Image (spheres, rainbow, N blue to C red):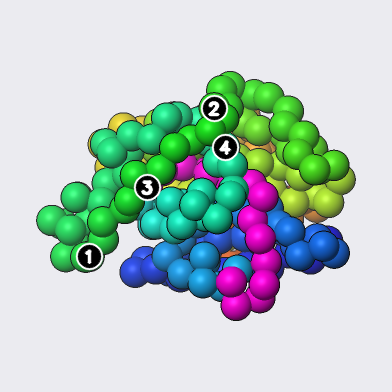
Amino acid sequence: MILHTFTGGAVQTNGYILEFDDKTCFVVDAPAGIGDFLKGHELKASYLLLTHQHFDHVEDASALAESGAEIYGHSEFDRTLIRDQQAREAWGIPVNVPNFNVNHLLEGKTSLTLGGLTFEVSHVPGHSPDSISFYLKDELFLFSGDALFAGSIGRTDLPGGSHEQLLDSIRENLYILPDDVAVFPGHGPDTHIGKEKQSNPFCPA
């Protein structure tokens, strides 16, 4: 298995691609352009795992669904979660996310096995009410979405956000993981759980 990081869209959002030998792949989040990246590398997405539905993480979700990917997320498609209108009004970003269907809903803390890989899924609200993380224990990979970044945490000033809730989510669900777990966030560089517990100024352990 090969892990690719794709960064695209107006706010430089990370999407992650787990590529297998047969050129199929799993995708975590769908920033603008990731569909073209898959086509260019002759990859076919079997599954799309959404950490949350803010516009920058789902701009290519519809395109991946049309190519056959099944979508997993915490909530049904919800325009109020996507915030594309807010992005247009507040930041002048010309986005319009096409509708898509979330095929499988993931609630609370659960285990998800797909194609031989098992993810531990945790609900980590605070940045968005539907935020979830995906922990691939066998590889020590955590896909944290916009909950936890390298040296920072997700913004909590959007509707449905809560600073205290986000801190609780991180401490109760992410900081309990082993220190050597690699963290792959929704924006910026990757990091490790141990490093963030030790030095993240916005969420001390």
Instruction: Tell me which residue sits at (67%, 50%) in the image.
Output: 46
Real-space Cα separation, disc 3 to disc 2, in angstroms: 16 Å
> Which element type, helix, strand or loop, lies under badge 3?
loop
Left or right side of 202 for 40: right
Real-space Cα separation, disc 4 to disc 3, in angstroms: 15 Å
How far across and down, in percent of the image, does residue 69 sit? 59, 48
Q: Is residue 137 above or below residue 151?
A: above
Residue 133: quarter of image: top right
Mark 4 touching mark 3, by CB under 8 A? no
Whichever of labels 3 and 2 marks the residue nearer the N terminus, that label is 3
Left or right side of 134 for 97: left
Whichever of labels 4 and 3 marks the residue nearer the N terminus, that label is 3
Dot 1 surroundings within 10 Å: few (below 14), some, or many (20 or more)?
some
- The residue tagged 4 is 72
Q: Is residue 37 above or below residue 134?
A: below
How far across and down, in percent of the image, does residue 49 sit? 59, 44
Instruction: Tell me which residue sits at (34%, 44%) in the image.
Output: 99
Query: Start and end of the magenta stretch?
Result: 39-54
Name the mark on residue 93.
1
How far across and down, in percent of the image, does residue 126 sit? 42, 35
Q: Is residue 152 magenta?
A: no
The quarter of the picture where the C terminus appears is top right
- The residue tagged 2 is 105
Mark 1 touching mark 4, by CB under 8 A? no
> Which element type, helix, strand or loop, lies under badge 4?
strand
- The residue tagged 3 is 54
**Can the viewer see residue 20 in this picture?**
yes
Left or right side of 138 for 185: left
The quarter of the picture where the N terminus appears is bottom right
Disc 3 marks a residue whose amino acid type is His
| Residue in front for this viewpoint, 12 or 161 | 12
